[in-house]
Amino acid sequence: MKDEIRLNAFAMNTVGHQSPGLWRHPRDRSADYRHLAHWLDLARTLERGRFDGIFFADVLGVYDVYGGTPDAALRAAIQVPANDPLLLVPAMAAVTEHLGFGVTATLTYEPPFPFARRMSTLDHLTGGRVGWNVVTGYLDSAARAAGRPRQVAHDARYDLAEEYMEVVYRLWEESWDDDAVLRDRASGVFTDPAKVRRIRHDGTHFQLDALHLSEPSPQRTPVLYQAGSSSRGRAFAGRHAECVFVSGPSAAVVAPRVRAIRQAAAEAGRDPDDILVFAMMTVILGETEAAAHARHEDYLAYADPVGALALMSGWTGVDFSRLRLDEEVRHVENDAGRTAMDNITRADPDRVWTVRQVAEHVGIGGIGPVMVGDPGQVADRLEAFAQATDVDGFNLCYAVLPESFEDIADLLVPELTRRGRYKRSYGSGTLREKLFGRARLDCSHPAGRLRCASGTQAPRRP
Amino acid sequence: MKDEIRLNAFAMNTVGHQSPGLWRHPRDRSADYRHLAHWLDLARTLERGRFDGIFFADVLGVYDVYGGTPDAALRAAIQVPANDPLLLVPAMAAVTEHLGFGVTATLTYEPPFPFARRMSTLDHLTGGRVGWNVVTGYLDSAARAAGRPRQVAHDARYDLAEEYMEVVYRLWEESWDDDAVLRDRASGVFTDPAKVRRIRHDGTHFQLDALHLSEPSPQRTPVLYQAGSSSRGRAFAGRHAECVFVSGPSAAVVAPRVRAIRQAAAEAGRDPDDILVFAMMTVILGETEAAAHARHEDYLAYADPVGALALMSGWTGVDFSRLRLDEEVRHVENDAGRTAMDNITRADPDRVWTVRQVAEHVGIGGIGPVMVGDPGQVADRLEAFAQATDVDGFNLCYAVLPESFEDIADLLVPELTRRGRYKRSYGSGTLREKLFGRARLDCSHPAGRLRCASGTQAPRRP
C-alpha cells in the first residue's frame, strides 16, 4: 500500500558517516563504532521505532581526492577508519526480531564464491532478514588496495557486475533444491545428493565449478538494494534491484529520478511498483518548532566544512581544495560523470553558491534535504515529499548518533502512525515478505527466473 | 605455567563436524547450526566451563574424493553444508566476556586487504578476543570454486602464504601508529595523518598501495593459530604460529610432533615455549566409569562408517570407496603427502586394520584419541598425555553437541580445577594477554618485528 511510509536508518561502521564534524558533538556516540554495545543499543532503538531496516554504507578505500591525500579525511574522520559492516549484523540480529539489515558490499574486489556463502550465512543467522546493497565502488584508492592502478572504467564495472550477479544468483537459487535437505535421522540422509547440483560458470571475469556450500537460506537471494544514478546504473537497478536509494536536494530533483528507475524496471520486463524507492533524508526534530531549530543550530556549530569538502571530493572525483572557500561555483566537471555538484545546484538553479555554502549544505546529512521542525511539521513535509516524488519511504541519515534515531522513534513515528501512514506493528516473515509480501523473487527478476526455469524439475547434477 | 591444562572447544559452522553420523543422535543439536540461539547457548556453556576459546574449522569446498563425487558427503552431512564461521563471532562475543574465538580462514582464495579489515573489525568488536587459524586449503574442490583446475601445489601454497602474511602483518602493525587516533573533540582532529602510513607492497602474488581501513584494534594482529603437519607447514608454524594444533592417535605419536614444532620455533629464532600446543582429543564422560562407557556405546550406535570414509578420503586425497570394508589396510599412498592413514596405523604399528575398523576409529572425534571414563579417570589420562607429549592443552571435539561440552564444563573442569590444573577464573585482557601475558607479539616474531622496526619513530608516509 502506498499509504505506508517506510523508514530505513542509514549508517556505516565508521565515525560520523554523512555529517562531517558532528562526531565532536557532546552527545554524539558514533566514535563508539568499535564497540558491540553501541550497535546493540542502536538495533534496539530502531526496532522500537519499527524501522524496516538499517542500511549500512561501506567503502573499501579512503577519500583522498581532496588535496590529493587522505589527510583531510583522516583528520576529520570522513568515513575513515571504516570497519566491515557485515560483522555487525549477527550481533544486532541477536537482540532484535524484525529489523532488516541492508549491507553494502563492493563486488569488484572480492571473489563471488566465498561472498555468496557469507550472505547465505547471514540470511540463515538472521532468519531471512538480510539485504545486499550491490556496489561497484567509486574510489581509485579502493582499486589500489586491490593492487590495481585505478578503478575499472565505469561501464566495464557494470559488465563485471552483471556477470557477478549471474554467478551469485546461480549459487543462491540453482545449486540446492528446496527439498534437498531432509535432516532425516531415521534414514541417516541429511541431504539428498540428487537435489544438489554443481554450478559451472566459465565467463569473462569469473570461472567456477562448485556446489554452493550453504543449504537454502530463508530468502536464498538476499533482498537486493541499489543506488546507481548513472544511466547504466539505472538500467542495472531496473533489472536487479528490489529497493533503490535515491538522493537529491529536493522533491523536484528526486521525482524524475524515481520515474526513470520505475521506467528502467518496466523496460527490464518488471512491474515498476516491484521496486521500493527510498529517498535520502535528514530530519531534525523537537517537541516544538523552536526546539527543533535550536537543536539544528546547535548541530551546525559542530559541522566541519573542510571535512564536508573532503567527502564531496571523494564522491565527485573533483579536488575542492583547489577552490577558495569564498569562490562561486555553478557546475564542477568530474571525470567519472557523477553529479554530486548538480545535486546541490539543481535544488535552486538560480542561486549562486560559494564553496563554503556547498560545504555547509553537505555538512549535515550529505547531499540529501534536511527537514527541521516539530513532529507534525516534519510528517507534513515527508508526506508531501513522498506524494510529489512517488518514493515509498526514506533512508534517514543521522546528524548525531543515536540521538537522531531516538528522536525519530519517539517523536516522528508516533505522529506518522497516528496519521495512518506508518505500520502499527511489524509484518511477519522474512525481510522480503515484510517489504513485498512474497518469499521469493518472481519470474520477472533474473534471480527469480533461474528458479522458475530450474524449479524442482530441473536436470540433476550429472 | 605448565601446570595449567588449557581447553579449546573444536567446532565448525556445519552439522556434526568430526563425528560422522552423530547428528542423528536424539540429543545432538548440531543440525541447528543455522540458528543464532544455538551458538549463543554454546558460547555461554563454554564460558561457564572457562574454555580459553572456541576454535572454528572451515573448508571452502566439499569432500568429493570418496567415489569421485560429493554424494557420500552430502548424504552423511560430512562438513557440508558449511556456513561461514567468521559471522558467528560477533553474536557469540555479545553474550560472553572472556571466551576467545579462533577462526579458520583459508588465505588462498580471498584477497588480503578486505580480509585484514574483517579480522580487525572482529578484534574491535570482541575487545581483542579473536584468533586466526591460518590455512592454505587442502581440497581441490575449493580451488575449482575459485576458478582454478586444481590446488596450487603444496609448497607453492606456503610461498603464497608467506607473502600473504607479510601483507596482512604490515596492514595490521605498520599502517597506524598506536597514538594515531586522537578522538579530540576540542581540536576536531580524529586521526593525526602524520601517524598513518600507506602500505606499499609489490610482490609475486599480491600488489597493494593502501592505508589499512581500521584503526589499531586491541591485539592488532589476531592470535595466530596453525595446524600444518608437513615439514613446510611445521617451518611455517615455527615462524608464525602462537598456538598450534596437533592431532595423532596416541601420546607416543604426538610427542615427537610437539618436539618438532618447538624445534621449528627455535630455528626461527623464537622461544620454543612461546608456542602453545593443543592436541586434538575427544572425551566421553559419565558420573561413573560405567555411565561413561554406556554413553560411548550409545554414541557408537549412531556413527556412520561411510561418512567417516568420505571424511578420510577428503583429508588424504585417497578414494576409500575403492576398498572393500573388510579389506586390510596398512599404509595408503596419497598424492599430497599427507599422513592421515599413518595417524591411525602409528598408534599400534603391529595391528592390522580393516577399512571398517578405520571407519570406526574415525567415527567419533576424527583421528584424535577418544578417552572414556569418569572425571577422575579422564583427568588422569589428560594429565598423563600432557606430561608425555609436552602439549599445553587440548582441542576438544564433540561427539554430541552441546552435550559433550556441557559434560566437560560440568564434570571434567571441576575435577581439573580441584587438582590445581585448571584456572579458577579467566585472566584479564585480550586473548593474547590471557594466553601469553603480553599484549603484542614480540620482536622475535615476524609481525612483532615490524612493530619493533617501525615503532613510533618510523619514517612517516611521504
Image: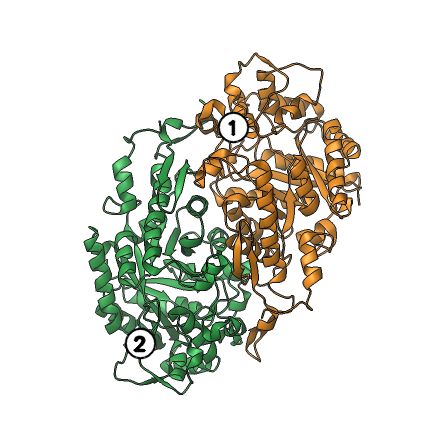
Chain colours: A green, B orange
Residue B75 against residue A116 in the figure, above or below:
above
Horizontal and vertical percent for residue B3? 80, 41
Instruction: Name the one closer to the observer, B243 or B427.
Output: B243
Q: Is residue B316 left or right of residue A286?
A: right
Instruction: Name the one closer to the observer, B326 or B462.
Output: B462
| Local SS, label 1 | loop
Give the residue type that dot 1 points to. Answer: Pro
Horizontal and vertical percent for residue B64? 47, 28
- Look at mark 2 in the image and give the residue it sits on: A377
- Dot 1: chain letter: B
At x 48%, y 35%, the residue is B150
Looking at the image, can residue A210 be seen? yes
Looking at the image, can residue B102 be seen? no
Residue A1 against residue B408 in the figure, above or below:
below
Give the residue type that dot 2 points to. Answer: Gln
- Dot 2: chain letter: A
Horizontal and vertical percent for residue B227? 64, 38
- Residue B26 image label: 1
Horizontal and vertical percent for residue B207? 52, 55
Q: Is residue A345 left or right of residue B441?
A: left
At x 42%, y 73%, the residue is A313
Instruction: Name the one closer to the observer, A10 or A324.
Output: A324
Check the picture and name the quadrant holding the N terminus of chain A. bottom left
